[in-house]
Amino acid sequence: MILRTPKKRSRLESTSDQPQSIHECIPTRVSDRRLVLYNDPSSSDQLEEQSDMVCTYHCRQMVKSEFMDALGSAEKEVSDCQSKLKTMSQHLDTKSEKEKFRQRILALEQELAASKGRENSLQERLLKEVSDSHNKYQQQATHSSELEIQLKKEEELRRNADSLAFVAKENAADAEQKLKHFSESAQREKQILLKEISESQSEAKTSHSRLNMELERMKFKADCAVEESDLLREKMENYVEKLNEGLSRRVTVLLPHHGEPVNYLCDGSQKAQKSAHPSV
């Protein structure tokens, strides 16, 4: 958008060959400092950044200040010209001089009206830009608060996943300890049974039938202990598998966009399972 002052009337140009009066020789600051506003189409993309909006706002405030200074000086010159016209009209009575002064006053009034129109247009545009900048700032603040809330939720989910992994490790360690205890108990019982068998063999001459019955009873007890150990090991493996599946499902629900905690928990559960097998 380009705002320009209106051109002078043709009747002023027709009198350019005549000698100029004193008021026509007076320079005016309005004609020397005309304000031209140029709206760059590419500036609409740059207004998306807050820093560019602030810079544009300050630049236009400076242009507005300069324009207001020019307008004030123009109004002052109009007032001076009117006072000079009033003073000199008392000394000049010719119609031609009065007509020239009247045309000069009309031209100044036209320039003043054009300046006021440019000022109003500039004020409306600046108000619109300030309103748009304020709306964009509010949108950015709202988006920033939403991102902060989402970040807090993700941090809470991460802490929950870490606590679940710690509990799973503790449960795996407890199960491994129990399995080790059962294995040691079975080994001790087996040693006791072997000792009893050796003692029974020494007494075979006196009680062969009794020794056979006792031997069968001890073998049955040993087999039961081995079967119980195998059952406990199978239960332990099933418990570890169910625990891994539960953790995988829960972590998948809690952290759909984070792959590191899931891999971390899976690696931890696999290490716990591997460490549980050698102890059997």
Image: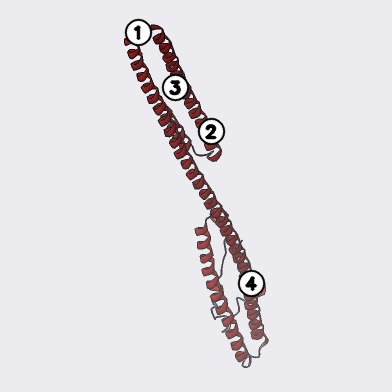
- Please tell me whether mark 4 or mark 3 is closer to you in this view: 3
Return the x and y of residue 234 as percentages of the image width and height.
Answer: 48, 23
- Please tell me whether mark 4 or mark 2 is closer to you in this view: 2
- Please name the residue that numbered disc 2 is placed on: 246
User: Marks 4 and 2, how far apart in space?
Assistant: 78 Å
User: Marks 3 and 1, how far apart in space?
Assistant: 35 Å
- Please name the residue that numbered disc 4 is placed on: 114
Q: Amino acid at mark 2?
A: Gly
Instruction: Say left or right for 145 vs 227.
Output: right
Q: 10 Å neighbourhood of mark 4: few (<14), some, or many (≥20)?
A: some
Return the x and y of residue 156 as percentages of the image width and height.
Answer: 50, 47
Q: 10 Å neighbourhood of mark 2: few (<14), some, or many (≥20)?
A: few
Q: Amino acid at mark 4?
A: Ala
Vertical order, 210 against 259 (above or below): above
Q: 10 Å neighbourhood of mark 3: few (<14), some, or many (≥20)?
A: some
- Disc 2 is placed on an element classified as helix
User: Marks 2 and 1, how far apart in space?
Assistant: 60 Å
Q: Amino acid at mark 1?
A: Thr
> Residue at (46%, 39%) from the top-left corner?
167
The quadrant of the rendering that contains the N terminus is bottom right
Residue 19 visible within the image: no
- Please name the residue that numbered disc 3 is placed on: 229
Question: Which label's residue is closer to the chain start, 2 or 1?
Answer: 1
Vertical order, 38 against 253 (above or below): below
- Disc 1 is placed on an element classified as loop
Instruction: Kindly identify which numbered label has been placed on residue 206.
Output: 1
Return the x and y of residue 119 as percentages of the image width and height.
Answer: 61, 71
